[in-house]
């Protein structure tokens, strides 16, 4: 068998690469889904820290009666610790402000109200800071713990917050890549041992066996320790390969045997033909003993020659596809009857009735159907002529019946019927013959021809004789 060229695969098309890539991508997608809430939480914590510094300032302010009397040596370190330009606190309708010396307060600021802890708003504010927080001034509003009902505002540049968030995002990205890589590799190692390795083994076994299916050493050996789906697949693949190997060996033997039989049969037919010619000459002698034995000799040689010729015809037969065309069924039956030895009325007491109506048209391969009908009519005639008991009015009948989608053609006789052995092996070559010395090839060929035309041939149950039904589709071609 000609071997197929090896498959050329990209290194990125292997199942291993696809699996580890898919695992890494899924982990990264999960990390991305977790990243935004994590980033929002980091921003909220960062802002809360600044508010806590503002709360410390509030407690310092409470220790003096007038905030304006607090020297800058005390307020500036508090503001610098918070990274703030100014701190405002409001209590009971009163507001107090401390600022760094020589700092001009901005005309407007972006507000971050930490009293609203809605998760979606926190995520949106985090994204907004990353996108637009490089040059803005931030106004942080909240109520630090330990300050009672005091509302604290911390005014500061937003750039430090954005820089810290970018650092945090970079760290998260690095950690996510490491986690994704380690997890994907660990899962890949497990999958390689449990799934991918056996699949590779199955793939290599199938490709190798396809190149040389008659090499028994290439039959895969199943892993007996596996009872999962892959284990079942290996077992069934081994059974399939074994059955295919056995079938190919048997087919090769049958092909070799058939070739030898065909050669022997061809030579045998030639010898039988020569003997037949000699027997015909012997039959013309006037010797009474020769006249008594010659017919039996001629009949035996005719039968042997016919057997040899039938075997050769079956061996040479080629399965050519049917060529359907509209056929006058009644005229075709007449031709088949003539070819089968019935001239339309009687032959040695056997009558032939063509009950197919005129103008019955069927789309079918005419040669195929003619061969089938000739075989069935000829078998029926021989069964009537060879009947051991006298039949009052031997008759072969051909009828047809049109259905909704099929045409049924029936070939029947009123003879002795088929013996049980012929019924059991009907349509099987060399097994289904109903007459001594027959091959059974006629019915086997008839079945092949009918099925090639999309039909079916069956033996009908009848009280007497034999009846074959040919069901063919109407206009299906």
Image (spheres, grey):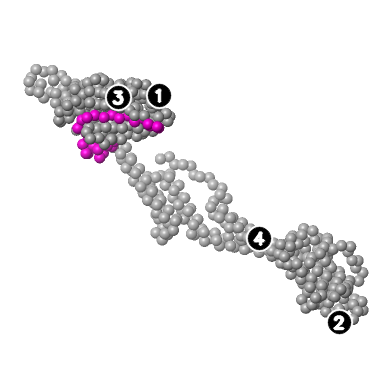
Q: Earlier in the sequence, mark 2 or mark 3?
A: 2
Q: Which residue is mark 4?
A: 33
Residue pointed to by mark 3: 355
Which element type, helix, strand or loop, lies under badge 1?
strand
Along the line of sight, the residue nearer the viewer: 185 or 370: 370
In the image, the segment drawn in magenta is 403-430
* Disc 4 secondary structure class: helix
Q: CA distance from mark 2 to mark 1?
A: 117 Å
Alpha carbon separation for disc pair 3 and 4: 83 Å
Q: Earlier in the sequence, mark 4 or mark 2?
A: 4
Mark nearest the camera among 4 and 1 is 1
Looking at the rendering, in which quadrant would you find the C terminus? top left
* The N terminus: image quadrant: top left
152, above or below 299, in the image: below
Is 135 left, or right, of 8 in this rendering?
right
Image-based side of 393 in relation to 240, left or right: left
Q: Image point 92% across, 69% down: which residue?
A: 102
- Asked which quadrant contains residue 103, the reply is bottom right
Within 10 angstroms of label 2, few (less than 14), some, or many (20 or more) residues? few
Question: Which residue does the numbered mark 1 point to in the structure image?
Answer: 326
Local secondary structure at mark 3: loop
Q: Residue at x 13, y 17 (%)?
A: 284
Residue nearer the viewer, 410 or 140: 410
Would you say 328 lies left or right of 383 here? right
Q: Are marks 2 and 1 in contact (CB under 8 Å)?
A: no
Reading the image, the residue beneath label 2 is 63
Between 266 and 62, the one nearer to me in the picture? 62
Residue 394, position as x, y percentages in the image: 20, 26
Residue 39 in view (yes/no) = no
Q: Nearer the viewer, residue 142 or 195?
A: 142
Q: Are marks 4 and 1 in contact (CB under 8 Å)?
A: no
């Amino acid at each position: 068998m000609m071997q197929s060229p090896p498959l050329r695969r990209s290194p990125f098309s292997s199942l291993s690469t696809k699996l580890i890539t898919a695992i890494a991508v899924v982990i990264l997608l999960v990390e991305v889904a977790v990243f935004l809430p994590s980033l929002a939480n980091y921003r909220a914590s960062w802002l809360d820290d600044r508010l806590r510094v503002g709360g410390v300032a509030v407690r310092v302010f409470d220790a003096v009666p007038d905030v304006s009397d607090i020297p800058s040596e005390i307020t500036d370190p508090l503001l610098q610790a918070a990274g703030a330009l100014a701190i405002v606190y409001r209590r009971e309708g009163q507001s107090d402000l401390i600022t760094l010396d020589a700092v001009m307060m901005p005309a407007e600021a972006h507000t971050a109200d930490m009293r609203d802890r809605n998760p979606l708003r926190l995520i949106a504010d985090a994204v907004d800071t990353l996108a637009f927080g490089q040059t803005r001034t931030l106004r942080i509003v909240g109520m630090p713990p330990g300050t009672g009902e005091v509302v604290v505002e911390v005014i500061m540049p937003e750039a430090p917050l954005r820089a810290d968030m970018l650092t945090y995002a970079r760290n998260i990205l690095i950690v996510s890549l490491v986690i994704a890589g380690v997890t994907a590799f660990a899962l890949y190692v497990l999958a390689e041992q449990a799934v991918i390795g056996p699949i590779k083994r199955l793939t290599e076994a199938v490709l190798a066996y396809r190149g040389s299916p008659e090499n028994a050493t290439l039959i895969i050996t199943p892993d007996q320790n596996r009872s999962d789906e892959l284990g079942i697949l290996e077992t069934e693949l081994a059974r399939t390969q074994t059955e295919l190997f056995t079938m190919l060996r048997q087919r090769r033997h049958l092909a070799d045997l058939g070739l030898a039989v065909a050669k022997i049969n061809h030579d045998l037919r030639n010898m039988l033909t020569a003997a037949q010619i000699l027997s015909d000459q012997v039959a013309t002698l006037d010797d009474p003993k020769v006249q008594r034995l010659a017919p039996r000799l001629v009949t035996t040689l005719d039968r042997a020659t016919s057997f040899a010729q039938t075997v050769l015809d079956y061996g040479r037969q080629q399965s050519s596809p049917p060529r359907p065309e509209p056929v006058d069924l009644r005229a075709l039956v007449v031709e088949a009857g003539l070819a089968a030895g019935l001239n339309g009325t009687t032959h040695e007491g056997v009558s032939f009735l063509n009950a197919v109506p005129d103008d019955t048209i069927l789309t079918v391969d005419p040669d195929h159907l003619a061969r089938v009908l000739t075989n069935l009519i000829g078998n029926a005639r021989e069964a009537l002529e060879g009947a051991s008991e006298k039949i009052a009015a031997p008759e072969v009948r051909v009828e047809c019946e049109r259905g909704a989608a099929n045409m049924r053609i029936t070939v029947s006789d009123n003879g002795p019927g088929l013996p049980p052995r012929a019924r059991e092996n009907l349509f099987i070559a060399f097994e289904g013959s109903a007459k001594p010395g027959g091959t059974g090839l006629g019915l086997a060929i008839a079945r092949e021809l009918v099925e090639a035309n999309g039909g079916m041939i069956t033996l009908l149950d009848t009280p007497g004789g034999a009846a074959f039904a040919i069901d063919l589709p109407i206009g299906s071609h």
